Image (cartoon, rainbow, N blue to C red):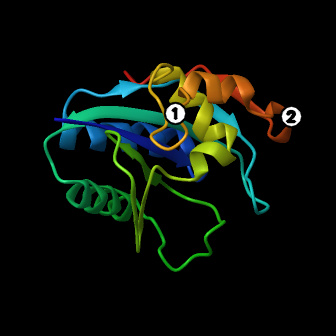
């Protein structure tokens, strides 16, 4: 069984889509470990404020199958594949980690470079896996978050109830 870490984000009907994204991941993969939900400004474009979080689970499914399932969930929730890379999203599910694998092929990068670039990815990842080591840097995500320049983004945790 592989440990998988997914970044989940939404800035279009963000509360409903965040809740629906977690429900879809639970339906597909079973028990999930959830970070807090964080509110962040759009990065790279002018847009509404995002909700972001990390969802972790174990699976015996192949990494490519997991990636395909994530795309299918995004599509089901109105993801527009023709929009620019930096644009508003109903639901954005990015495969951050698959165990300690290192993959760099068309359409699949593990670990995702966004982990080291954006607070809205690293903070929730460090929350759910503080002692897990980045497979290329040999530093824990807790240490990477400690060292991260937090002045670059305005990010704050929000109260979010998934049981509604």
Identify the residue shown where x is 59% and y is 19%: 159
Nearer the viewer's eye, disc 1 or disc 2?
1
Q: Secondary structure at mark 2?
A: helix
Tell me the number on the disc at residue 138.
Answer: 1
Q: Quadrant of residue 71?
A: bottom left
Q: Residue at x 50, y 44 (%)?
A: 136
Q: Position of residue 96 (x, y in %)?
A: 44, 47
**Residue 22, disc:** none
Residues packed near mark 1 inside 10 Å, few (<14), some (14 to 19) or many (20 plus): few
The residue lying toward the viewer, choosing from 87 and 58, is: 58
Asked whether 40 or 77 is in front, the reply is 40
Q: Position of residue 32 (x, y in %)?
A: 30, 28
Which residue appears farthest toward the bottom when viewing the image? 82
In the rendered structure, find residue 151 and report the number of the disc placed on it: 2
Label 1 sits on a secondary structure element that is: loop
- Closer to the chain start, of discs 1 and 2, is 1
Q: Name the quarter where the C terminus is drawn.
A: top left
Query: Compared with residue 158, is residue 55 higher up or lower down, i.e. above or below?
Result: below
């Amino acid at each position: 069984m592989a440990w998988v870490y997914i970044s989940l984000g939404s800035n279009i009907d963000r509360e409903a889509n965040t809740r629906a994204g977690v429900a879809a991941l639970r339906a597909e993969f079973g028990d999930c470990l959830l970070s807090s939900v964080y509110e962040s400004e759009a990065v790279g474009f002018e847009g509404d404020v995002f909700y972001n979080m990390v969802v972790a689970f174990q699976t015996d499914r192949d990494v490519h199958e997991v990636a395909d399932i994530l795309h299918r969930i995004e599509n089901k929730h109105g993801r527009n594949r023709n929009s620019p890379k930096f644009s508003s999203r109903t639901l954005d599910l990015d495969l951050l980690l698959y165990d300690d694998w290192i993959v760099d092929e068309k359409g699949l990068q593990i670990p995702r470079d966004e982990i080291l670039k954006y607070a809205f990815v690293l903070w929730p990842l460090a929350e759910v896996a503080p002692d897990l080591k980045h497979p290329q840097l040999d530093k824990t995500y807790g240490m990477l978050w400690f060292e991260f320049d937090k002045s670059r983004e305005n990010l704050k945790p929000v109260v979010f109830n998934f049981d509604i």
